[in-house]
């Protein structure tokens, strides 16, 4: 994007970040998101590594194969997102629409699978505040439930918001609002989407596998 | 980055394979500490792939990369300092 | 690009403003109107916080005596006008909350970052005007939610403004449940508002500077607001995350901060102060920046050590991330950690001292103009120094164990936040009022307000050092219940009476503010003979700010330059040696 230093009415501004405002704004917002997840993941690490705290082994409570599949879904949605961006960069409107719809569907599917996972876990008595029976079986069950639901829940909320924004972008794409020369919206929502994917990659490892 | 073909499908393949490897490592029964380090290494690698290629950080001006990396020391500051509390 | 058209559209408005009343004054996207909206909202919350302080002081000085006009409070708060202990805890909590989150922080950041950043940088508006509007209305909603918590069963939060868990996490402990939850929701809204604001400020400063306005030609006020925005951007989400965990502890049964199920109350303190210490600098850095502008102007001299000022701000902001443990020396911290926090805290004295010395050197042999903004700015330097010095006392681990949670701490925070931030805010209000509203504030009444405030402020807060060293604990409901504190009671009454007089001393300010809105002397374009870009446009500036994007030739502090006849040299005035060409052309554009 070479128009970073054009400000108002074609007047040149002092060179700043050399990217356009919306993209810069999204990156600035994402640094803030990093700190939000720092708070959540950091608390989890601190609580879990406290002396005397035992933790359930991976796969003991949570359904790892299901979530591994779900992780794959989210990675797929990231690929379709980047494909949508690549499509509009070469002016391919049809490709843009196709890949955006695919992203929306995959994102919504991810949230659906997560809902199903929650449903199953709650059925087994695994709640933010652990049930009596499970508490006897799972070490530090209360902390396990607290951290699990808070971290994955906030990630799920982020995906859901992302899906809603993505639907909006998709509608705009079907109305032909994006062109080869002007598709900032697709790139900016893409940054958010990939960030959410990135957070999930870390969460999957930290929450489910370690 | 304009006009150049990006290796998106290659990155996708790498992410998928790494995910499978991660699940494998978690259940293969390696010593606990080694498992954790390998998993963290793999996860960071995956995250970097997403950031560098899908988020195009590899092709952005250096100043934007610096901006994106600016908050990264802070999580370590928070967690490590509190963990010192436990080491008595 | 779409943005360019939108901005060009706004430029056209500068000549012909046809927005409806609603779009212009209520749901405005103009950064200047949003700044003014913030100003009115924050002054209201400042009044609320002040009234709460008066109630606190009444109880401390005259425990058990009915309040004058106490009959207006319901039985659950103050039966027959006598403040209940539970209500006293709520008063202390809400005084801190309103002053920090709803008065000082938005007065500095909401008002002046909004108003000054685009004007001083030569931009037509913020980078994201609609997000900016949303930021203001989120702030208003959070304020309304916080006020609403006074009217729910159990009253407002009573866990202190730091809402330490588990006191805040278990409703039975403090007797407050709905009020505490409203507190959390309100601050989460506030965090969202602050986030939107910060994204806006940072993007605007990085990307929307007028040609020639290089980073090191920015006024120090903009530098400090920029760095403050970075701090807020990175610190406030930590608070938001911690608050959500606290809310979950109360509502859905998580156990983050509840020790009986493996949670850690100390985790709350770590998270809170990991946010809280950068927050302390959010509350003071913009004040330092604006005071630098005003002192250079009032001394008619270039600011001394401009670059060192910038690096000092950055240094304070950086150190602010690794000192949070000094709020927790009492928590039984690992001595290794305690010592490192002590050392890093004391290191902050270095950049701070650089700033104070630079202000003094700026005033040294200057042609000082003692107008109201300058008087308030000099008071800032003096009072902030007192507050900073008592801060070094408390940074010492061993000393802090003695004075922690006494009135010494209360004296310290008020010297920094009232003597520091609030005097700077008064200076800024007097200084930029003509630009905001097109009229001057009355100078005589401004000086009366300053003199009264300065005297009574010191009479209120200086004795607190003394009773603090004497062992008078803060947040105590009835100080007479301990024999050793009974001799301090006359001092307490003295403080309280001074506090009432301090409150009354604000009346000249309020009258001056509103009277000048309608009857004040019409302001010229540049009443303070300043160099900044905002003083090259009419007072108040039109929507869109600049008819032609200005070109900047120099830094903002060229006072008493030998090259011109006047004692100021605006940033936009080209001298003979300055080239008039636009900055670099971008290839392929």
Image (tube, coloured by chain):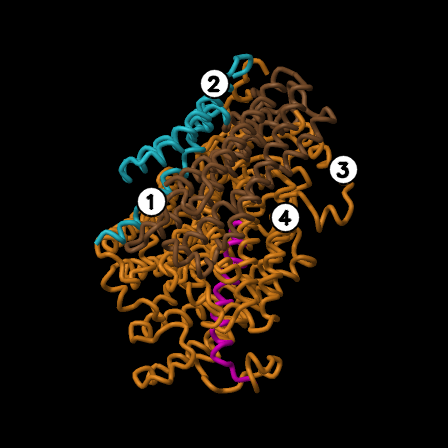
Chain colours: A brown, B cyan, C orange
Pointer 3 chain = C
Q: Quadrant of residue C469?
A: bottom left
First along the sequence among labels 4 and 3: 3
Q: Is residue C364 visible?
A: no
* C538 sits left or right of B84 in the view: right
Residue at image coords 71%, 37%: C14
> Where does the magenta region start and end?
C81-109
Both on one chain, marks 3 and 2?
Answer: no
Q: Residues within 10 Å of mark 2 (few under 14, many from 20)?
A: few
Both on one chain, marks 3 and 1?
Answer: no
Q: Is residue C181 visible?
A: yes
Pointer 2 chain = B
- Residue C473: where, in percent of width, then height? 35, 74
Q: Residues within 10 Å of mark 3 (few under 14, many from 20)?
A: few
Tell me the residue that label 2 is attached to.
B10
Pointer 4 chain = C
Tell me the residue that label 4 is attached to.
C34
Q: Nearer the viewer, mark 3 or mark 1?
A: 1
The numbered dot on residue C16 is 3
CB atoms of marks 1 and 4 within 8 Å: no
CB atoms of marks 4 and 3 within 8 Å: no
Q: Quadrant of the C terminus of chain A?
A: top left
């Amino acid at each position: 994007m070479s128009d970073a230093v054009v400000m108002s009415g074609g007047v040149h501004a002092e060179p700043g970040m050399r990217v356009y405002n919306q993209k810069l704004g999204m990156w600035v917002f994402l640094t803030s998101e990093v700190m939000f997840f720092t708070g959540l993941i950091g608390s989890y690490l601190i609580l879990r590594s406290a002396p005397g705290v035992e933790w359930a082994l991976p796969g003991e409570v949570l359904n790892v194969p299901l979530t591994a599949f779900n992780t794959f879904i989210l990675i797929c949605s990231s690929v379709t997102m980047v494909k949508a961006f690549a499509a509009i960069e070469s002016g391919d409107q049809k490709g843009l629409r196709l890949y955006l719809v695919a992203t929306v569907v995959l994102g919504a599917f991810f949230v659906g699978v997560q809902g199903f996972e929650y449903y199953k876990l709650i059925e087994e008595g695994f709640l933010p505040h652990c049930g009596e029976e499970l508490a006897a079986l799972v070490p530090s069950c209360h902390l396990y439930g607290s951290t699990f639901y808070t971290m994955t829940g906030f990630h799920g909320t982020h995906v859901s918001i992302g899906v809603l924004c993505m639907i909006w972008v998709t509608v705009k794409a079907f109305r032909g609002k994006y062109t080869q020369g002007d598709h900032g919206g697709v790139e900016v929502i893409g940054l958010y989407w990939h960030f959410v994917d990135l957070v999930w990659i870390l969460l999957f490892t930290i929450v489910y596998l370690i | 980055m304009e006009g150049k073909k990006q290796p998106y499908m290659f990155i996708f393949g790498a992410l998928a394979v790494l995910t499978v490897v991660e699940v494998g490592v978690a259940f293969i029964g390696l010593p606990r500490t080694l498992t954790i380090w390998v998993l963290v290494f793999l996860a960071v690698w995956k995250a970097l792939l997403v950031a560098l290629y899908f988020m195009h950080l590899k092709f952005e001006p250096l100043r934007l990369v610096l901006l994106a990396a600016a908050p990264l020391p802070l999580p370590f500051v928070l967690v490590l300092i509190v963990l010192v509390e436990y080491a008595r | 690009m779409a943005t360019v058209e939108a901005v060009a559209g706004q430029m056209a408005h500068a000549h012909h403003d046809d927005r409806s009343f609603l779009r212009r004054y209520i749901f405005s996207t103009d950064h200047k109107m949003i700044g003014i909206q913030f100003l009115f909202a924050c002054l209201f919350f400042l009044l609320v916080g002040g009234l709460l302080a008066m109630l606190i002081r009444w109880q401390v000085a005259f425990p058990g005596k009915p309040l004058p006009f106490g009959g207006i409070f319901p039985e659950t708060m103050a039966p027959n006008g006598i403040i209940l202990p539970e209500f006293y805890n709520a008063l202390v909590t809400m005084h801190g909350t309103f002053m920090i989150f709803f008065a000082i922080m938005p007065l500095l950041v909401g008002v002046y970052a909004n108003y000054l950043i685009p004007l001083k940088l030569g931009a037509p508006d913020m980078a994201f005007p609609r997000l900016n509007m949303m930021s203001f209305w989120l702030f208003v909603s959070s304020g309304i939610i916080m006020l609403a918590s006074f009217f729910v069963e159990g009253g407002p939060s009573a866990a202190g403004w730091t809402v330490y868990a588990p006191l805040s996490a278990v409703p039975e402990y403090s007797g407050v449940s709905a009020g505490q939850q409203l507190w959390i929701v309100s601050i989460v809204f506030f965090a969202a508002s602050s986030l939107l604001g910060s994204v806006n400020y940072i993007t605007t400063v990085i990307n929307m500077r007028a040609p020639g306005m290089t980073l090191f030609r920015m006024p120090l006020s903009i530098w400090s607001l920029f760095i403050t925005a970075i701090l807020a951007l990175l610190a406030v989400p930590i608070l938001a995350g911690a608050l959500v965990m606290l809310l979950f502890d109360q509502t859905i049964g998580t156990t983050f901060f509840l020790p009986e199920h493996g949670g850690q109350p100390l985790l709350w303190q770590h998270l809170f102060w990991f946010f809280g210490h950068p927050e302390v600098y959010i509350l003071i850095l913009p004040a330092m920046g604006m005071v630098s502008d005003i002192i250079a102007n009032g001394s008619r001299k270039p600011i001394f050590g401009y670059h060192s000022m910038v690096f000092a701000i950055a240094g304070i902001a950086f150190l602010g991330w690794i000192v949070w443990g000094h709020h927790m020396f009492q928590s039984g911290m690992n001595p290794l950690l305690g010592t490192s926090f002590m050392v890093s805290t004391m290191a902050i004295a270095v950049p701070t001292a650089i700033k104070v010395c630079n202000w003094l050197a700026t005033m040294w042999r200057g042609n000082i103009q003692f107008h109201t903004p300058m008087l308030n700015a000099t008071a800032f330097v003096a009072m902030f120094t007192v507050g900073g010095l008592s801060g070094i006392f408390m940074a010492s681990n061993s000393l802090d164990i003695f004075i922690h949670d006494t009135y010494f701490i209360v004296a310290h925070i008020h010297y920094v936040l009232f003597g520091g931030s609030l005097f700077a805010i008064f200076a800024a209000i007097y200084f930029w009022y003509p630009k905001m509203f097109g009229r001057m504030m009355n100078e005589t009444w401004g000086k009366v307000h300053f003199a009264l405030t300065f005297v009574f402020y010191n009479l209120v807060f200086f004795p607190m050092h003394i009773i603090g060293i004497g062992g008078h604990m803060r947040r105590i409901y009835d100080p007479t219940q301990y024999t050793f504190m009974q001799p301090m009671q006359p001092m307490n009454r003295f403080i309280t009476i001074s506090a009432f007089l301090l409150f009354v001393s604000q009346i000249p300010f309020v009258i001056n503010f509103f009277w000048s809105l309608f009857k004040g002397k019409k302001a010229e374009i540049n009443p303070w003979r300043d160099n900044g870009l905002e003083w090259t446009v009419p007072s108040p500036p039109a929507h869109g700010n600049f008819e032609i994007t200005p070109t900047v030739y120099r830094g903002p502090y060229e006072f008493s330059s030998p090259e011109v006849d006047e004692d100021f040299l605006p940033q936009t005035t080209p001298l003979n040696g300055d080239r008039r060409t636009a900055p670099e052309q971008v290839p392929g554009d």
